[in-house]
């Protein structure tokens, strides 16, 4: 559905997108993640034909987004980062206007508008002025706009930006539902959203793709380097050093001391199961050990670890 090859965007003072390639298959819901300034919006604007790339190519459903831009755009419903709406129009009137701009006429336009209104839960407010809508409803109107011509592909740039947790949850359900009929590329900062709705995640950092895989795979990759929490009955100073001396342990932090019990967090190197060595040390030192627990990495851990390891200036 989407095919991106060696795509780059160079602005005068910086490279916003640096030679990226990826594909999205029909029916996939792909999360497009990355810190601020990573190049997500720039990539999306190239895919939707709003800005030309400096080099490389992109196609939507087999149509090059530049040489066959009209055909490519017909397949896309695009919800930009800051949804631009006409404040002095009513919701339904605006969607009708948008449907016509997208080439729908008569019955077809009416049907497109009605379906989008239903899907996005806008029925109650369809006659309201856009200027009077709350942020959440504005976002929904933006999504309805993207849906009005029933496009095969939805490209949503931070659609839940500025929504409250309830609205985010509703939005997520809506995305899942839309995923049944549409291919979706969704840029977001909200990792739980990606974990719950996306089959695949592409992580962008400083204009480059640094990870591309299933959300579970990305967090599993880090699991070998996961964190271990332990509770030891001792307040001796040397505990940290003795644990840190165990082969395969990267870092030991003392979280706190509660009476006789000390709480520690241990980071192990990838591929090392250090739990047995920790138990052996505790036995040898005669420190009662009442808990040893591996904390599994989440997608958030993966995101932080991967983007920090790949960031040049921090
Ligand atoms: N029109 C422009 N002219 C010059 N530089 C730009 C322009 N648009 C974006 N940039 C720069 O390109 C880089 C990528 O920006 P982009 O908006 O694509 O990031 P993003 O991943 O969408 O970030 P965010 O999460 O904050 O939305 C940034 O360093 C940004 O300052
Ligand atoms: Mg952006």
Image (cartoon, helix red, strand yellow):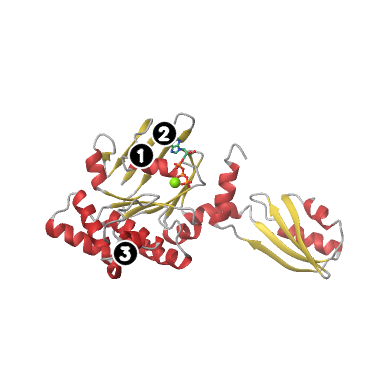
- The answer to which image quadrant residue 110 occupies is bottom left
Q: Which residue is mark 1?
A: 46
Identify the mark nearer the N-term, 1 or 2.
Answer: 2
Q: CA distance from mark 3 to mark 1?
A: 27 Å
Identify the mark nearer the N-term, 3 or 1.
Answer: 1
Q: Position of residue 227 (x, y in %)?
A: 66, 57
> Is the C-beta separation of discs 1 and 2 under 8 Å?
yes
Q: Position of residue 82 (x, y in %)?
A: 39, 50
**Viewer can see residue 73:** yes
**In the image, which disc is placed on residue 120?**
3
Q: Secondary structure at mark 3?
A: loop
Is the residue marked 2 within 8 Å of ligand 1, measured from its CB?
yes
Instruction: Residue at 61% x, 37% y: name it.
Output: 313
Q: Position of residue 147 (x, y in %)?
A: 28, 56
**Viewer can see residue 262:** no
Q: Which residue is mark 2?
A: 9
Q: Secondary structure at mark 2?
A: strand
């Amino acid at each position: 559905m989407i095919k991106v090859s060696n795509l780059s965007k160079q602005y005068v003072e910086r490279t916003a997108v640096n030679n990226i390639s990826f594909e999205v298959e029909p029916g996939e819901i792909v999360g497009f993640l990355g810190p601020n300034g990573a190049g997500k919006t720039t990539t999306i604007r190239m895919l939707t034909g709003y800005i030309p790339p400096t080099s490389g190519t992109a196609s939507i459903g087999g149509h090059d987004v530049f040489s066959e831009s009209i055909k490519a755009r017909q397949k896309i419903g695009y919800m930009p980062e800051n949804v631009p709406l006409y404040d002095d129009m009513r919701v339904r009137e605006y969607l009708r206007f948008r449907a016509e701009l997208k080439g729908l006429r008569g019955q077809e336009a009416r049907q497109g508008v009605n379906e989008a209104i239903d899907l996005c839960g806008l029925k109650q407010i369809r006659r309201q002025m856009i200027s009077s809508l709350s942020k959440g409803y504005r976002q929904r109107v933006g999504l309805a706009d993207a849906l009005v011509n029933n496009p095969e592909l939805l490209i949503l740039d931070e659609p839940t930006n500025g929504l409250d947790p309830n609205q985010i949850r509703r939005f997520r359900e809506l995305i899942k539902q839309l995923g049944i009929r549409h291919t979706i590329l969704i840029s977001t900062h909200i990792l739980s959203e990606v974990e719950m709705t996306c089959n695949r995640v592409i992580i962008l950092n400083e204009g480059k793709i640094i990870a591309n895989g299933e959300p579970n795979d990305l967090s599993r990759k880090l699991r070998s380097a996961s964190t271990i929490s332990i509770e030891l009955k001792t307040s001796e100073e040397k505990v940290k050093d003795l644990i840190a001396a165990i082969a395969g342990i990267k870092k030991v932090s003392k979280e706190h001391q509660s009476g006789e019990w000390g709480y520690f967090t241990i980071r192990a190197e990838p591929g090392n199961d250090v739990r047995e060595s920790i138990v052996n040390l505790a036995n040898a030192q005669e420190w009662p050990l009442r808990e040893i627990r591996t904390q599994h990495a989440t997608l958030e851990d993966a995101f932080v670890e991967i983007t920090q390891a790949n960031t040049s200036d921090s």
